[in-house]
Amino acid sequence: DTAVSQTPKYLVTQMGNDKSIKCEQNLGHDTMYWYKQDSKKFLKIMFSYNNKELIINETVPNRFSPKSPDKAHLNLHINSLELGDSAVYFCASSQGLTGGWAGELFFGEGSRLTVL
Amino acid sequence: SQQGEEDPQALSIQEGENATMNCSYKTSINNLQWYRQNSGRGLVHLILIRSNEREKHSGRLRVTLDTSKKSSSLLITASRAADTASYFCATAVSNDMRFGAGTRLTVKP
């Protein structure tokens, strides 16, 4: 069984459209993340949820809206897609260490978004 | 914002040689982690070193941490062609994990 699975793996769409990426983890972790990796391989944190509550919300356009229906799922919805949104989006999960520090992250295989 | 910065950006070595990658960061951390990413794949965790540790080993991997210099290094000994990948350091600041831009390692057979 895949520990962190995200769908779809590839997404090609036109500017202005709305799209969603889904993520599920079966590891029982309490924290989930969305990261964006650009063409230069920079990996930037976007959001983090702990037990369904938003704890990290980086400077991301409000066209991006995460939703966590339960602690095993963290979905990402993007409105009014722009060319600059083209990237690989990674979902990850972790079980926090004592004291609330981030532990080992388990990543999904990524969702490559191409906006035309 | 980025936290870690890896150095060098790219490294090319022959099979059997050792590979050393460095990471510098800016703020106080709880732990530092190294990850590997094969082309087109997700990141895979390699090793975690806590802020009160100075060195850690895992198989052919050796990680050092110098909190006074805010730096870490990853050494891969006796490299193999299969070690070809990008390597990232990530720093834990509270429940937040910040990644550097990675080092692209190429191991030639």
Image (spheres, coloured by chain):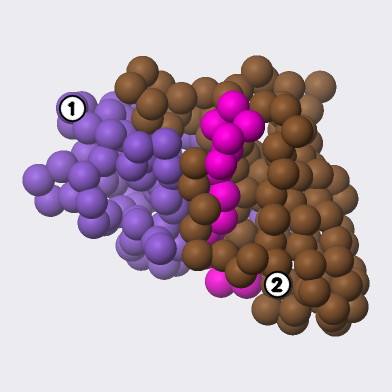
Chain colours: A brown, B purple
Q: Amino acid at mark 1?
A: Asn
Range drawn in magenta:
A38-54
Q: Amino acid at mark 2?
A: Asp
Residue A34 location in percent, x, y? 62, 49
Give the answer, above or below, for where B17 lies relative to B49.
below
| Left-right relation of A33 to A55 | right
Q: In this orientation, which residue lies closer to the viewer: A18 or A3?
A: A18
Residue B3 location in percent, x, y? 35, 57
Q: What residue is disc 1 on?
A: B52
Give the answer, above or below, for where B73 lies relative to B51.
below
Q: What residue is disc 2 on?
A: A85
The residue most toward the left is: B68
The answer to whether one can see residue A101 in this image is yes
The answer to whether one can see residue B61 in this image is no
Q: Which label sits on residue B107?
A: none
Determine the chain carrying the residue at label 1.
B
Q: In this orientation, which residue lies closer to the viewer: B79 or A93?
A: A93
- Location of residue A70 by image quarter: top right
Q: Is residue A114 magenta?
A: no
